[in-house]
Amino acid sequence: MTKLWHVAWHEYRRHVFTRRFVLVGLLSVPLVILVMGGLILLIFSLDTNTTPLGYVDHSGLLVDPVSAPAPEWPDYPVPTLPFETEAAARSALDAGQIQAYYILPANYLSTGQLSVVHLGEFKSSASYQFYAFLTANLLRNTDPVIANRLVKGTQIIVQSPDGSRSISSDNWFTVLIPMVAGIAFIIAMFSTGGYLMQAVVEEKENRTMEVIITSVSPNQFMAGKIIGDTAIGLSQILLWMVFIVIPILVLRNRISFLRGIQIAPQTLLLGAFVMFPAFILVSALMAAIGATVSDAREGQQMVSILSLPIWIPYMLTGLLMSNPNSPLALGLSLFPLTAPLTMLMRDGLTILPAWQIALCAAIQVLCAAGAIWLAGRAFRLGMLRYGKRLKWREVFAKA
Amino acid sequence: MTAVELSHISKSFGPVKAVDDVSFSIEKGELFGLLGPNGAGKTTSLRVMLDIFKPESGSVDLLGGPMTEAKKDRIGYMPEERGLYQDIPLDRCLAYLGSLKGLSPAEVRKRSDVYLERFDLAAFKTKKVKELSKGMQQKAQVIATLLHQPELLIVDEPFGGLDPVNTQMVKDLLLEQHQQGVTIILCSHQMHQVEELCDRIVLIDHGKVMLYGVLEDIRRQFSGHSVTVRTGDKLPALEGVERVEPGNGTLKLHLSPGTLPQQVLRSLVAQNIALEQFEISMPTLDEIFIRVVQGKGVEA
C-alpha cells in the first residue's frame, strides 16, 4: 500500500514542480483573467471622457442642485457645470471646456423631454451620469426609501418553490457560474489527464516500465498514478479558485455585480459527488489510452476522440437552456462522459432532483471504478508492447 | 538449496513459440549464466520467471515458492531494455526506484551515495538523467538494481554499452555480490564474460534448452578432438591427425575420429619432437555456442 503512495507522490511531484506546470497549468487561467480584466478596463477608459458636461436649466429643477451619486468603479466621475444661457454653453462647448450640454425646457417636468448638444462623439457613460444627476435632483425631496425604489425600477426575482435559489437582475450571471466552472473543470481534467497519459507512454517509450513492474504490482502502480493525477487536477482547480476568488473579494465592494455572486450548496455537492468521480474516470481512461498506444502522438489522437462526447453538452447549450429538464438533458446527465458538464449547466438553470444527482453520482462512481480496472488491465497487457499498439479488443477479450 | 526453478515453461506470442518446455534450476548463492543468441528466448524466460508474463504451461519457483509482491523487494532486476526517468535528477530517480523496493529515503540516500561515489557519479547526482552519457546511465541503472541489496540479482546484458574500465567495474561488482552470497543470473550473449564469471550455464536457442550444466563439464564434453602443440621443430606427418592448423606460435592438430590425444603424444615423443607445450584443446564457450546454435553439436 505504501508503494501506491510513493507512485502517487512521484507522479504529483514530477508534474507539479515543473516550470511548464506553473506557467501553463497554473498561471494560464489567472493570466487569461488578467488580460480580460485589462481589456475591460481599456475599453472603459476609451469609453470614458471626463471633460465636464454642461446644462442649461429653464425648468428651475436644478437650482441649487445636489451632487449625483459617485459612479461605480471603473467609471470615472464627470463633473456637471450649469450655464445661464444656451449661448454661454455653446461657447464653452466650442472652446472644448465641456463635451456636451443638456437643455432642460421649462415644461420638462410635464413632457419629460430634453435636448443635448454635442460636437463630436458623445460617450454613453457621461450620458448615464447626467441622468443620475438629474434623477437625484428630481427625487431630492422624496423619502429616500421610495427614491431608491424609483431609481432601481422593477425587480423581478425568479425563485425556486423551496426558496433555496433565486435569480434577479442583480445576480443573473449566477446562472452562468456552474457552466463556466464546468468548462474550467473539463479543461483541468483534460490537461492533467494528458499528463498521466503522457507519463504512461513515456514509461513505455523510455523502458522504465519493466523496472517498475518488478517492484510494484500493475494495479498499485496504476492506482497510484491516478491518485497523483487527481491530486494534480485538484491542486490546479484550487489554485485557479484562489486566483479567481481573491480578486472577487477585493473588488466586490467596488463592483456591484460581483456582490451578487453566490455558489449554491447543490453546486458544491455536484462537485464532490459527480465531478470528482468524473475526474477519476477520465484520468483512468487517459491512463488506459497511454497503456494501449505506441507513442504520444497516437495517444493525443485517441484523447481527441475521447473529448468529443465530453463537449457535447456545450454544443447543445441552446437546447439545454431552453428546456433543462427535457429527456435529452436527463439522458446526457446520466451518460458518464456527458454528465459532468450537463449537470453543471442544468444546475444553473433548474433545480436538479435529488434522485438525479444520486443516480448520476452512482453511475460516475461505478464507471470510475470500471475505468481503473480497465486501465490496470490495459497496462498489464500493453506495458511491454514497445512500439506496438494494444488493440482494445485484446483488452476485453482476455478479461 | 534452490533459489530459482523453472519447470517445463512454455510461452508463445501468437504463432511464435518464444519459450518451449524450458526447465532449469539455480542454486542459492550461484552465479548462473543464461545464454543464447538474440531472439532465443532468454528475456522471455526471465520475464516468466519474474511473473511479468504468465506461462502457458509449467511452473516457476522463486525464492521458495511462487512470485509474490513481497518477494519483489528481494529481487533486483536490470532488464536489457534500460530505462530511467529522463526528466528528473539522478538522485531523485534513485530515491523513487529505491522507495518502490521498500527503502526509506534515508536508506536510499546513504546507499546511493556509496554507489555513486564508487561509480564516479557523485558529481552528477543532481543532474537530470537525460544529461548523463549512455555509459553513466548504464551505471546508474546498475546502482538502482543493487540499492535494496537483493537476494536474487537478475542482470540482462549488463555489459552492453560499457567501456572496458566500466565493464571491469561491473564485473567486480557482480563477483563481490556473488561472494556475499547473492544469487546472480547473468543473461548475456557475450560468451567470454559468462565464461569468466559463471560456474553453471543454460544455453537456450529457438526457445529450447540446448545445453545445461557445469561449464567445465560442458567444455570437456566438447573437447577431445584436437590438441594444441608448441614446438620449435618441424612436425612430421602423424598418424591419426587429419589437419594441422597454425595458431599464434602454436599448432592445433585436428584428430581423426577414434584417435586419442595420448596416441598423438606417444607418436611425437617417439619421433623426438622437442615439445614446449602439449594440451588437449578445450573449446571456448564462443566455439561451443557457435557449434550448438549452428546445429553441429558435440564432435564425434
Image: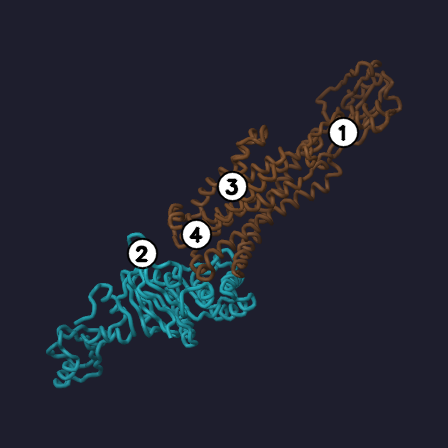
Chain colours: A brown, B cyan
Q: Which mark is residue A336?
A: 3
Q: Is residue B260 left or right of residue A307?
A: left
Q: Which residue is mark 4?
A: A377
CB atoms at circles 2 and 4 under 8 Å apart? no
Q: Which is in the foreground here, disc 2 or disc 1?
A: 2
Question: Both on one chain, marks 4 and 1?
Answer: yes
CA distance separating discs 2 and 4:
20 Å
Q: Chain of mark 2?
A: B
Q: Is residue B192 above or below residue A215?
A: below
State how far apart marks 2 and 1 are (Cα).
84 Å
Lower sequence index among marks 4 and 1: 1
Residue A280, horizontal then vertical, whole percent = 53, 48
Q: Which residue is mark 2?
A: B12
Q: Chain of mark 1?
A: A
Q: Is residue A30 left or right of residue A56?
A: left
Amino acid at pointer 3: Pro
Using the numbered discs, state the Cα–Cα distance from disc 3 to disc 2 in whole angstroms: 38 Å
Secondary structure category for the residue under label 2: strand
Under circle 4, the secondary element is helix
User: Horizontal and vertical percent for residue B169?
Assistant: 42, 71
In percent of width and height, residue B144 lies at 47, 65
The CA distance from mark 1 to mark 3 is 54 Å
